[in-house]
Image (tube, grey):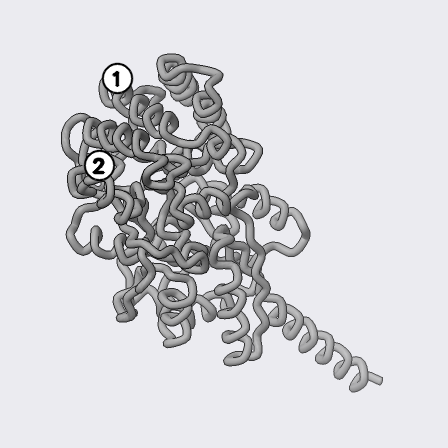
């Protein structure tokens, strides 16, 4: 009887271990790479026998809402994404150290907190004002001259006057709607233009001011004028009701000369097979010249200290060090890898442009994720939408933004 009980106990332990390994769960925030990541998960299962489930939030659904629901579901993810200090601090008590993981040998972009490596860089990403070079050529606009506000204003005005001739529905394909979940474009990525453009990397002057409830008055005024300019030359319907897909389609189909998005959209862009050359111009909002785009690891994979920790780290090691992982990152997900051992180079247009700007050393930092949780998308995003809808003018927009930022310190 004792032998039978011992065998049963051993069987339970084996089944429990097998169950745990059979349910490696990743919660990630990029809808545009979901299919590629799921395919890579199948490759990993074929190699190791460990199935991987991918849960996605993002695009028109709020990733943080999806992640919090998963955390409360009774089966926490083994791997999930953080986007900076706010995300780390929110989940710090659950996050495992990845010190000594194989992948750490090949990158300088790991997320380090509390003296330990905690985050695997998903990619190096960048964004600026993507442009249709064919359209700009026909309009006689050299994208290399788009390095200040006045140059953009003149270019937008010229393109707007030639919309019928050029087949454009709008000058800029831009979104700002709260109901479509696109306030990350405005309240995070566009707001970061104010925080970092023109600064040396790691210069925290303006984010430090914002976190203290203040702005640089003249710089912020110029920034607000730039936001208003983009909205003025965007399509009103697209601004309020546009989704990530419709925003992309307008640009890919040649109906917009500019596109306010990052290279994370390459996997979706190439499926639409645009027939024109695409690259990035700077978000040059100042009257003085600034010549660079915004490049950084956008997010990091962290591992659950209470989950399948060893298997999760093994998965990330495989992702960073295998040929299959390199192929997934560069060819399938169209990303710019953060790892020195990956020698493949992307052929997709937005990622190619990011690599060129990065190689030239013309980049600015990402500091939007240092904002308080929900502040960028929630508080600021609603104010951007008011301007986009015409409910307020640019002076009121500026005043409301300053007042909201002041509230951080209260």
Where residue 39 sits: x, y (%)? Answer: 52, 69
| Residue 275 found in image quarter | bottom left
Query: Of discs 1 and 2, which sits in the foreground?
Result: 1
Where residue 312 sits: x, y (%)? Answer: 50, 65
Q: Nearer the viewer, residue 199 or 190?
A: 190
Can you see residue 406?
no
User: Mark 1 falls on what kind of element?
Assistant: helix
- What residue do we see at 18% from left, 56% from top? 359
Can you see residue 75?
yes
Q: Nearer the viewer, residue 296 or 127?
A: 127
Looking at the image, residue 157 sits to the left or right of residue 26; the answer is left
**Residue 185 versus residue 318 in the image, above or below:** above
Q: Which residue is mark 2?
A: 203
Quadrant into which the N terminus falls:
bottom right
Where residue 296 sits: x, y (%)? Answer: 30, 48
Where residue 229 sits: x, y (%)? Answer: 32, 26
Looking at the image, residue 103 sits to the left or right of residue 286; the answer is right
- What residue do we see at 36% from left, 66% from top? 330
Looking at the image, residue 38 sits to the left or right of residue 228; the answer is right
- What residue do we see at 36% from left, 35% from top? 164
Q: Tell me the number on the disc at residue 187.
A: none
**Residue 265 versus residue 159 in the image, above or below:** below
Quadrant into which the C terminus falls:
top left
Looking at the image, residue 379 sits to the left or right of residue 121; the answer is right
Looking at this view, name the residue that lies furthest to the right: 1
- What residue do we see at 50% from left, 50% from top? 29
Q: Tell me the number on the disc at residue 217.
A: 1
Count of numbered circles in the view: 2
**Crowdedness near tag 2: few (<14), some (14–19) or many (≥20) residues, C-alpha within 10 Å:** some
């Amino acid at each position: 009887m004792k032998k039978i009980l011992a065998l049963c106990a051993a069987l339970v332990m084996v089944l429990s271990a097998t169950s745990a390994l059979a349910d490696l769960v990743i919660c990630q925030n990029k809808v545009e790479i979901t299919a590629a990541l799921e395919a890579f998960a199948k490759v990993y299962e074929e190699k190791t026998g460990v199935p991987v489930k991918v849960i996605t939030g993002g695009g028109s659904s709020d990733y943080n809402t999806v992640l919090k629901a998963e955390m409360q579901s009774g089966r926490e993810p083994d791997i999930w994404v953080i986007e900076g200090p706010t995300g780390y601090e929110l989940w710090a008590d659950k996050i495992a150290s990845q010190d000594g993981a194989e992948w750490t040998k090949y990158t300088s972009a790991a997320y380090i907190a509390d003296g330990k490596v905690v985050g695997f860089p998903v990619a190096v990403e960048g964004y600026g004002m993507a442009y249709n070079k064919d359209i700009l050529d026909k309009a006689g606009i050299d994208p290399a001259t788009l390095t200040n506000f006045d140059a953009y204003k003149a270019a937008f005005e010229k393109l707007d006057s030639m919309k019928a001739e050029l087949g454009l529905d709008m000058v800029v394909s831009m979104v700002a709607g709260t109901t479509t979940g696109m306030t990350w474009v405005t309240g995070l990525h566009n707001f970061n233009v104010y925080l970092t453009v023109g600064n040396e990397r790691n210069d925290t002057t303006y984010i430090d001011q914002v976190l203290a409830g203040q702005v640089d008055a003249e710089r912020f005024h110029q920034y607000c004028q730039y936001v208003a300019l983009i909205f003025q030359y965007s399509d009103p319907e697209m601004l309020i009701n546009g989704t990530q897909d419709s925003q992309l389609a307008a640009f890919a189909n040649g109906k917009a000369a500019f596109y306010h998005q990052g290279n994370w959209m390459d996997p979706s862009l190439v499926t639409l097979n645009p027939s024109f050359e695409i690259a990035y111009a700077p978000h040059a909002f100042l009257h003085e010249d600034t010549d660079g785009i915004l490049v950084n690891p956008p997010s990091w994979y962290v591992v659950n200290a209470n989950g399948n920790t060893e298997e999760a780290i093994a998965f990330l090691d495989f992702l960073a060090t295998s040929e299959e992982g390199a192929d997934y990152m560069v060819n399938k997900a169209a990303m710019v890898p953060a790892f020195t051992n990956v020698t493949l180079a992307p052929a997709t247009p937005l990622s190619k442009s990011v690599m060129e700007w990065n190689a030239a050393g013309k980049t600015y930092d990402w500091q939007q994720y240092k904002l308080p949780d929900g502040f960028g998308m929630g508080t600021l995003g609603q104010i951007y939408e008011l301007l986009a809808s015409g409910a307020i003018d640019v002076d009121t927009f500026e005043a409301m933004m300053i007042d909201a930022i002041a509230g951080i310190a209260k």
